Amino acid sequence: MAKIILVVEDYQSIQKVFETALASEGYDVTVAADGQEALQIVDKLRPDLILLDLLMPNVGGLEFLRLFKAKEHPETKVVVFSNLSSPELYKEATELGAAGFLAKSKFTPKELVETIKDTLAKK
Amino acid sequence: MIEATAKHQNGHKFPVELSFATWQAGAQAFSTAIVRDLTVHHMLVKKLAQKTEQLEDRVQSQTKLLRSQLAQSEKTQAEDEALLGSIGEGMVAMDKSGRIFYANREFTRLTGANLDQIKGRHFYSTITVENESGRLIPRSHRPMQQALQTGRRVSSDEYFYRSTDDRVFPVSVTAAPIVLKGKVIGGIDVIRDITKEKEVDRLKSEFVSLASHQLRTPATAVKGLLALLLEGYNGKLTPEQTANIKQAFDENENELKLVDDMLDVAKLDAGELMIQLAPVDISRLIREVVAEQHIISKTRHQTVDIDLPRELLVPADRSKIRMVFENLLTNAGKYSPEGTKIQVSSEQSAKKLSIHVKDRGIGIAAKDMGNLFKRFSRATNAAQVHASGSGLGLYLAKKIVDLHHGRIEVESGLGQGSTFTVILPKQHKE
């Protein structure tokens, strides 16, 4: 069965890029426009991986991580994919359970797909 | 005794003094008259009077002079006091041993110190200076001590003063020696409270940080959309389409790089660009950077010769020091003609590691050398090669190397290629 990926991203053009690249790789992709929307669907969706932006309206990425951690879905991997980066943010996101922290502007769709594949393959 | 005027037989008149006496001798009475010529006496009296008068005149004029000089000196002192007192910067003056002999109003206002209390006391122990984390700056590092030792003006913006009521504020300090006949006899410390400037810097960097994020987001979207095309997600492209989209993609990458650099500069300016040192294998790091840039150098038919030992460990901040070599290697490629060679080599001693990045490019004119590491500066001949650049790369590289207590050296001349050398200490310095 295709792996389920939830993309949490508020910027439409970027949503489109992620969706196109991941779907063409055979993943089952769902998009949420912010953390709040993601929290509403995450229990039913049970994604294998969440691709999470940080700076979003309503519920931002770090807040989402905090709330999602409380839901206890250890089978779901969260990869932070943001244009914000600092050692403090990295530390905080990792402590909140993020499996990866990537700089959004450094990746092309193909590189993103490779990274997602690697992350999903890891135990 | 009477004074009278006598007349000489020759008609000359002269002053005389007449005294008379009568006495009895038996039945006979006698009278004596004594006449004394007073000419000389009168002359002397007159002279004396003149002298006295002259003397009095002189005393009077001297007194007048003294009075005016005193008034002048009081006026000068008052003027000096008003002048020094009304300066918006704190000023404290001391002798060579550091004993305070003067402080203006702003200095006592800023520090909360009372002039009478600090006069005659030792500057370094009376007025203490701290760094950002509250540690006291030792005397040998104080700008004043350095100014007194070197005889030169020393400035710093890094320190903090603590006032008597425990307010800590950032200051800009300029210490200048007082030199008399070629000898340093004391020093003047001028301090300015730069709390407001720091706040403006902070707001500015916050703004740049937010603006950078906002600028980066659409550019990231453009990158993704163009890459979808280039990576074949939207079907096959003609070679011409590929070429144009590749060009658009590269331009967008430049834009992203510029935004990244601006953000780093803003962080640097706000003192937020911190480095965390850990052992880094510079040899491996350079190989990684070169491998990443392989595609770029290949299209320009350039080769990179890496002549480095297998391992070169130094304490460094991996991602920051990586930026330095990325920058130097990108520059070497960018400003060199197609088909040329870039060489990376190293030298080391017990204390330091030097990495040389040598190119055979357009070189740097002597007049541009001084501005090379300044913000937004580009060499005058940079435009010749149609290379894009923000003028921030070397500025950032130098700042990062500075944070590692290292330095960057350049050897170059117009048309002679350039060699950039990064020198890093092998020991972790506090």
Image (cartoon, coloured by chain):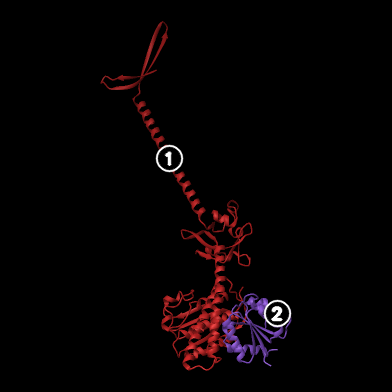
- Three-letter code for the amino acid on which mark 2 is drawn: Phe
Asked whether the beta carbons under mark 1 and mark 2 sit within 8 Å of each other, the answer is: no
Residue lying at 71% horizontally and 84% vertically, measured from the top left: A44
Residue B135, above or below A118: above
State the purple chain.
A
Q: Quadrant of the C terminus of chain A?
A: bottom right
Looking at the picture, tell me which residue is in the foreground, B303 or B136: B303
Which residue is most to the left? B10
Answer with left or right where residue A45 lies relative to residue B129.
Answer: right
- Three-letter code for the amino acid on which mark 1 is drawn: Lys
Q: Find residue B394 and report its horizontal and vertical position in percent.
A: 50, 78
Q: Colour of chain B?
A: red
Answer with left or right where residue A93 lies relative to residue B41.
Answer: right
Q: Which residue is mark 1?
A: B64
Mark 1–mark 2 distance (CA, rounded to whole Å): 93 Å
Residue B99, above or below B234: above
Mark 1 element type? helix
Does residue B352 appear in the picture of this structure? Answer: no
Q: Find residue B81 and report its horizontal and vertical position in percent.
A: 50, 51
Looking at the picture, tell me which residue is in the foreground, B391 or A70: A70
Answer with left or right where residue B287 lies relative to residue B36.
Answer: right
Q: Find residue B175 and report its horizontal and vertical position in percent.
A: 52, 62
State which chain disc 1 sits on: B
Residue lying at 50% horizontally and 64% vertically, measured from the top left: B153
Q: Which mark is residue A68?
A: 2
The mark total stands at 2
